[in-house]
């Protein structure tokens, strides 16, 4: 079901002449839809469908007993950064069966926020591998669920087999303020990386 608001749409001001694209990615049930919703200044576009018995054999709901929907195409949100620049957020679906969409969604992305659930580290390996293959700059963002155990950064880095230049950030994606701080830290990481390359 595509979810859009019945509220009058908030169009970009005509002064906006450029846009940048950020991916929000990660495995199934990690909080991508929630993060896009927390960041977007407009009601986000969501392509969520109700999970059915047909998906029981492919969607592992272990530790996610209340999850009843899943993204089947993308989540989309927008932030107007200035009078001249907009940022578009594209949330990717988490399951492998939807990955044919991944390459199209990632095309032209400035970078990616890779959400991770540290209770299920192994679920993140495939997504991180895709980002590395596509050579998309990314940061790992550990979503702080209520029962997320605290791990030292060096343990997380080793468990995820991350290169030293990949930042590990933390955020409760349900908290709008924390979500915006995460985005600011991520954009700052991209800016520093661009300066080092110039």
Image: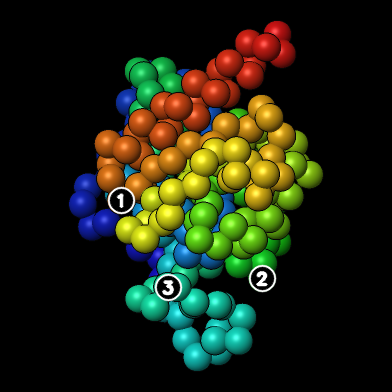
Which residue corresponds to mark 1?
A: 174
- Residue sitting nearer the eye, 184 or 172: 172
**Residue at disc 1, secondary structure:** loop
**Within 10 angstroms of label 3, few (less than 14), some, or many (20 or more) residues?**
few
Which numbered disc, 1 or 3, marks the residue that appears first in the sequence? 3
Q: Residue at left 56%, top 54%?
A: 26
- Residue sitting nearer the eye, 64 or 158: 158
Give the answer, above or below, for where 193 lies relative to 109: above
Which numbered disc, 1 or 2, marks the residue that appears first in the sequence? 2
Q: Quadrant of residue 125?
A: bottom right
Q: Quadrant of residue 139?
A: top right
**Residue at disc 3, secondary structure:** loop
Q: Quadrant of residue 126?
A: bottom right
Asked if one can make out residue 154 in the rendered structure from this viewpoint, the answer is yes
Which residue corresponds to mark 3?
A: 64
Asked if one can make out residue 90 in the rendered structure from this viewpoint, the answer is no
Give the answer, above or below, for where 15 lies relative to 72: above
Q: Is residue 42 left or right of residue 1?
A: left
**Res. 34 mark:** none
Q: Residue at left 61%, top 67%?
A: 95
How far is mark 1 from mark 3, CA to CA? 16 Å
Closer to the camera: disc 3 or disc 2? 3
Give the answer, above or below, for where 51 lies relative to 1: below
**Residue at disc 2, secondary structure:** helix
Which numbered disc, 3 or 2, marks the residue that appears first in the sequence? 3
**Within 10 angstroms of label 1, few (less than 14), some, or many (20 or more) residues?**
some
**Within 10 angstroms of label 2, few (less than 14), some, or many (20 or more) residues?**
few
> x%, y% of residue 190?
57, 23
How far is mark 1 from mark 2, CA to CA? 27 Å
**Res. 97 mark:** 2
> x%, y% of residue 63?
45, 73
Number of disc labels: 3
């Amino acid at each position: 079901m595509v979810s859009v608001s019945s509220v009058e749409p908030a169009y970009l001001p005509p002064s906006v002449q450029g846009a940048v694209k950020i991916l929000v990615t990660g495995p199934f049930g990690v909080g991508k839809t929630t993060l896009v919703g927390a960041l977007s200044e407009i009601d986000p576009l969501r392509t969520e469908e109700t999970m059915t018995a047909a998906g029981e054999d492919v969607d592992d709901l272990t530790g996610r007993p209340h999850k009843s929907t899943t993204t089947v195409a993308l989540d989309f949100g927008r932030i107007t950064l200035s009078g001249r620049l907009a940022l578009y957020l594209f949330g990717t679906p988490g399951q492998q069966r939807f990955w044919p969409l991944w390459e199209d969604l990632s095309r032209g992305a400035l970078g990616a926020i890779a959400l991770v659930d540290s209770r299920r580290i192994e679920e993140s390996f495939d997504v991180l591998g895709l980002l590395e293959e596509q050579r998309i700059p990314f940061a790992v963002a550990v979503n702080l669920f209520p029962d997320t155990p605290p791990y030292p950064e060096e343990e997380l880095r080793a468990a995820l087999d991350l290169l030293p230049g990949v930042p590990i950030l933390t955020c409760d994606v349900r908290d709008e303020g924390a979500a915006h701080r995460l985005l600011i830290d991520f954009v700052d990481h991209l800016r520093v990386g661009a300066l080092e390359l110039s």
